[in-house]
Image (spheres, coloured by chain):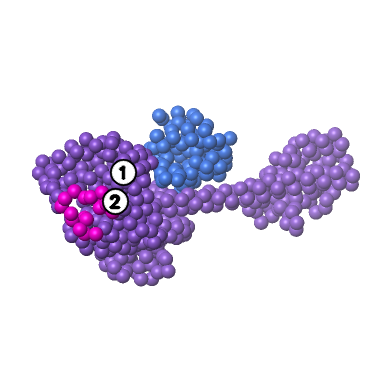
Amino acid sequence: MKDNYTDNFLKKIGENLNLKKQQQVFENMLGKSDWEILPSGSGKEKPAERFFDDGKGHGLLIPLKQGNQVYGYIVARGFKYPVTDELMAVFTVFIETVMREVQKEMELTKLYDTIRPRAIALSTIHTIHRLISSTLDLDELMPRIARLCLQVMRAKSCKIFLLENNRKILALKAFVSADKEIQKIKSRSKPSGILGRIARTGASSLTPKRILVPLIDEDVMGIISINNKLGDKPFTEFDKEILTTFSEQAIIAIRNAQLYEEQEKLTIGSIKALAAILDTRPKHIQTHSQMFVKLVIDVAKQLGMTAQEMRVLKYASFLHDAGKVMIPDEILRKPKKLTGEEFQIIKKHPIKGVEIVKPIEVLKPVIPIILYHHERFDGTGYPKGLKGKDIPLGSRIMSVVDAFISMISKQPYRECLSAEEALSEIKRYSGTQFDPEVVDAFLKIAPKGKRPL
Amino acid sequence: MNLNKILSCPARKKIIHFFYSNPASIDTLKGIMTWTGLDKKEAVNALEELVKEKILIPHRVTSTVGYAYMPNKKQAQAIRKYFDGIGKYKTLS
């Protein structure tokens, strides 16, 4: 039976043997002859014997076989003299060597053709895994997955839906189209039609123009939908398999981001609860305010802090004055100047604050920020007298914002300043009490105005 | 830059041929070096140029960049015409 392998095999044997050359070699010994490679099952009649005389001259027949499979024959006819056993033996060895070489070459080519596309596909999956695992921010992750999906599937558009509200709502989380930038359309609806069926059954759907694949993590969590293949080709079963593999990668990243988001909410909730407990004090000695947290984060953004650094700073902002809970009310509310002894007690509040947050593992990174938020840039602050950049950046930011908030807030011993007056004071102490870089960043985002805030 | 000029650089030609043969591929610098046999310097320069020409798009994250094939229709047609007849899985010498 003829097939591609047989064709290639015989073609390569022909190339490697170089029949014309063989013809010349044999001509010197046995006279002129005609040579050909006869494919097995070609319908052409082959001689019955290895050595034959067909009336027009002598000939030889050598089967081209691997194992029991005969792919064809080398036939030479028209020799003036019969082919000797010795010559035949030498030629047979030569042919077997050529066949072994051809076989090796074909196996290598086959291996290369089979393995290379799979290795490239595997490398793509690995790259996708790296690209989608590098963020835990769902708002960043969903369009990234959609864009990569569009790319891998060579589709014109991709939508990603997630089931929410106990699987009652199907929310469109990302929509990317090859023609346009990321679409900001977001929709929420009850899962119905084909989307509803997939949400219920977890079965994929394939049509020439669309593939829908569920995102499954124990249960159906969402659906990836791709539309219209580039080049107007129809989607195939193979495309569906690729999208299924892609969705398995995607759901891992989505679940990680969702779990992280839940954990983050839990952490912030716990910190807020702790801050609220600490704030059950007279208003003027409350440990933090929303404004304080917002200004600190705004300055951090200006200074290019990373998301992780800002997260830690946010936690610290809620709790930076937690230690004041351990300072007697009489000292905190005292309308007159504090005595030296009272000031020594006040100076302990960063250390007391650290004692409060220390047992909570997730708050470990905030400890230095809380501990040093009363240090001054020139080294005259407390508790350690750290100087310049030895003070953590978060502490240097909080120092500026804390002073500003304190100046614009009414205190037992003085009236509040306007934002403009407070900013003027901040500028005055830039380089001594405050880090000038932080002051510059703060001035860009600080509230302005001549009236008290 | 027109396509002929882009393809006049052997490194760019190898990378385009790789992506033309494997259009669904998304790979990093290291991967592309493996599939094309280019060294790091050649690959980095060629990738930069191809991104600039919008034949490839970079998916950038903190730890890596994944390059993907996204020529426009005109570029895609010209590339197809250029490579017509060259076996898809053959490595360009």
- Dot 1 falls on a residue whose secondary structure is loop
Tell me, yes or no, whether dots 2 and 1 are on the same chain.
Answer: yes
Q: Amino acid at mark 2?
A: Gln
Q: Which residue is disc 1 drawn over? A: A381
Q: Earlier in the sequence, mark 2 or mark 1?
A: 2
Q: Chain of mark 2?
A: A
Residue at image position (45%, 31%) is B6
Q: Nearer the viewer, residue A339 or B41?
A: A339
Around disc 2, counting alpha carbons within 10 Å, would you say few (fewer than 14), some (14 to 19), or many (20 or more)? few
Q: Which chain is purple?
A: A
- Dot 2 falls on a residue whose secondary structure is helix
Q: Which residue is disc 2 drawn over? A: A344
Q: Position of residue B17 (x, y in %)?
A: 50, 39
A227 displayed left or right of A128: left
Report how many numbered discs are placed on residues in the image.
2
User: Is residue A407 shown in magenta?
Assistant: no
As drawn, the label of residue A98 is none
For residue A79, above or below residue A318: above
Which region is colored magenta?
A: A328-346
